[in-house]
Amino acid sequence: MQISFNFTIFVSKYFEFNQIERNNMAKVCEICGKKPLSGNNISHAHNRTRRRWLPNLQTVRANLNGRSVRIKVCASCLKQGKVVKAV
């Protein structure tokens, strides 16, 4: 007895559902999409080392489609009022 199970369809449907439900990517603002930037630290001797500038993300309970959901939002979106906080 052989059971046919198409794993690729299962995986694609699972990830499609998760992306619709909520963006789970780390260090990304879910409102404006602000991400980490990369560049160099440059010392006085002009030595260069790689570094990252991270966005100021805050975890906020917000109202989305009538539901209370926790999302990661950058401080600039909070200050501009782009997020409606849940009471």
Image (spheres, helix red, strand yellow):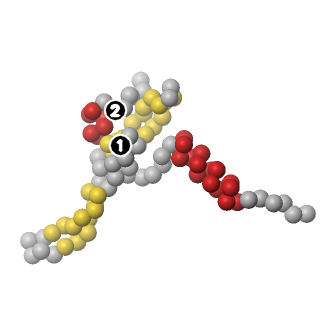
Q: Is residue 59 above or below residue 62?
A: below
Residues at marks 2 and 1 touching, judged by CB atoms closer than 8 Å: yes
In percent of width and height, residue 15 lies at: 58, 51
Residue 25, percent from left and from top? 45, 52
Q: Give the number of marks.
A: 2
Q: Residue at x 64, y 50 (%)?
A: 13
In the picture, the quarter occupied by the C terminus is top left
Q: Residues within 10 Å of mark 1 (few under 14, many from 20)?
A: few
Residue type pointed to by label 1: Cys
Horizontally, residue 20 falls left or right of residue 57, namely right
Please state which of residues 76 and 59 is positioned toward the viewer in this rendering.
76
Determine whether 71 is above or below 67 in the image. below
* Foreground of the two, 2 or 75: 2
Question: Image quarter for residue 43?
Answer: bottom left
Q: Position of residue 67 (x, y in %)?
A: 51, 29
Left or right: 13, with 73 as reference point: right
Residue under the image location 47 percent in, 31 percent down: 64
- Compared across the picture, whether 62 is left or right of 14 comes to left
Mark 2 lies on residue: 82
The amino acid sitting under disc 2 is Lys
Q: Is residue 37 left or right of residue 26?
A: left
Please tell me which residue is depicted at 91% across the width and 63% down the height of the picture: 1
Residue 29 x %, y %: 37, 45
Residue designated by label 1: 32
Instruction: Residue 11: name its quadrant.
Output: bottom right
User: Which element type, helix, strand or loop, lies under badge 2?
Assistant: loop
